[in-house]
Image (tube, grey):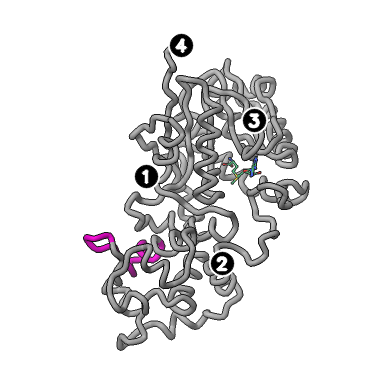
Amino acid sequence: MQYPLLDLAPITRHLRAVASSRLLIAAVHHLPVFECLAKGPLSIEGLRHQLGLQQRPAMVLFPALCAMGLLAFDSEHKLLITPLGKYLLVSSSPNLTGYVGLEKNDAGVLEMVERLKNDGPLDVNIGLSYVKEGNTASPMDDPQSARFFTLALAGRAQYLSPLVAAKLPGKTHLLDVAGGTGYYSYEWLLANPTARATVFDRTAVLEVAKELLDSFSRSGRPGAQSVKARVAFQPGDMLTDELPKTDLLLAASLFHDWPESTCRRLAKRFAEAIHPGGELCVHDAFLNDSLDGPLAVTDYSAMLFLHTKGRAYSRKEYAAWLKEAGLEVKEQYVPTLMEYGLISASKAYTGE
Ligand SMILES: C[S@@+](CC[C@H](N)C(=O)[O-])C[C@H]1O[C@@H](n2cnc3c(N)ncnc32)[C@H](O)[C@@H]1O
């Protein structure tokens, strides 16, 4: 790779923008967001109730409309329509509602509307990408689709992992939960030549990770050959199985696949797996604490909403779960690239 790295964010921004276009059309033509607010500002909860939306779709839609400059928060943290957003009211003359409605019956828009209204697909037995929960069949357990979804993330992980590895602390053992390709572990082991790592994921995903480790070891990069013997692959269910104890736990692009209640549960499970003095690092893209952007992340959140059980969260939301799990959250935010960054939290020594 060439250094300094070129930020690939423009590519993912364009990719994700389609999901937020669908949010915009849905908000104007299928959920009367602007008409509801025409009577005056409403709290998030107030607007959510008027629209009949559950929490997750509301927290995908409202921040996105703020990031687009169409809604904003007033001094009482109520949502209002901005001067730009007023052009999406049928009572405004002129307005762009007709123009925005050209694609209102597009299949992708209708799918977004269904998922917004229902907080996910109508058929709850549809296997969602990157998610394995309970007895519902998951594409991550089917060899063919697990390979497809895992390899789809390989380029991003391969590109970001040297940067992430350089910013992670040096410890003796890394637990890469839901590690996918395992690239974050391989790069971290290259940077920490005596450390070990465990990649924890579903069996079918780990089959792909093992092949990628083989190529990584044979890449000819100095030290790469020594990495293979220091990696363990552990198949399992991170929601129910006991996790190996570790002094550094990485949760890369993981929490955003899950609803808030599961994120809380995961934070607790991860905190339990960390030795006193150890650290938990989250590599992800974060909403502003004010929940009104940035646009690149609200676009991403719309895409995550369509394909997983999650959405993008703010650093404040992560901090609350990690604190609740007994960890000490660090103030520092370490940006990487492609809108991602690292936040971390440590587990206090017990003094034993
Ligand atoms: C979005 S991918 C992230 C992969 C990797 N951390 C990365 O950043 O490239 C989420 C991963 O979570 C794994 N996963 C989902 N549900 C799981 C579960 N219940 N137990 C273990 N792994 C799970 C998936 O198989 C997938 O590899």
Counting from the top left corner in percent of width and height, residue 158 is at 58, 39
Counting from the top left corner in percent of width and height, residue 21 is at 48, 69
Q: Which residue is mark 3?
A: 242
Counting from the top left corner in percent of width and height, residue 323 is at 41, 35
Residue 99 is inside the magenta segment: no
Cα separation between marks 3 and 4 = 24 Å
Indicate if the residue with disc 4 has its beta carbon within 8 Å of ligand 1: no
Residues rendered magenta in the picture: 64-77
* Ligand 1, image quadrant it occupies: top right
Give the numbered dot on residue 118: 2
The 10 Å Cα crowd at callout 4, few under 14, some 14 to 19, many 20 or more, is few
Compared to 81, does 329 lie above or below? above
Circle 3 SS class: loop
Mark toward the start of the polypeptide (2 vs 1): 2
Give the numbered dot on residue 316: 1
Residue, far top: 352
Q: Could you say which quadrant of the image residue 277 lies in?
A: top left
At 42% across and 48% down in the image, what residue appears? 286
Q: Which residue is mark 4?
A: 352
Mark toward the start of the polypeptide (2 vs 4): 2
| Amino acid at pointer 4 | Glu
Cα separation between marks 1 and 3 = 28 Å
Frontmost residue, 287 versus 37? 37
Cα separation between marks 3 and 2 = 33 Å
Cα separation between marks 4 and 1 = 31 Å
At 71% across and 51% down in the image, what residue appears? 138
Q: Is residue 4 left or right of residue 115?
A: left
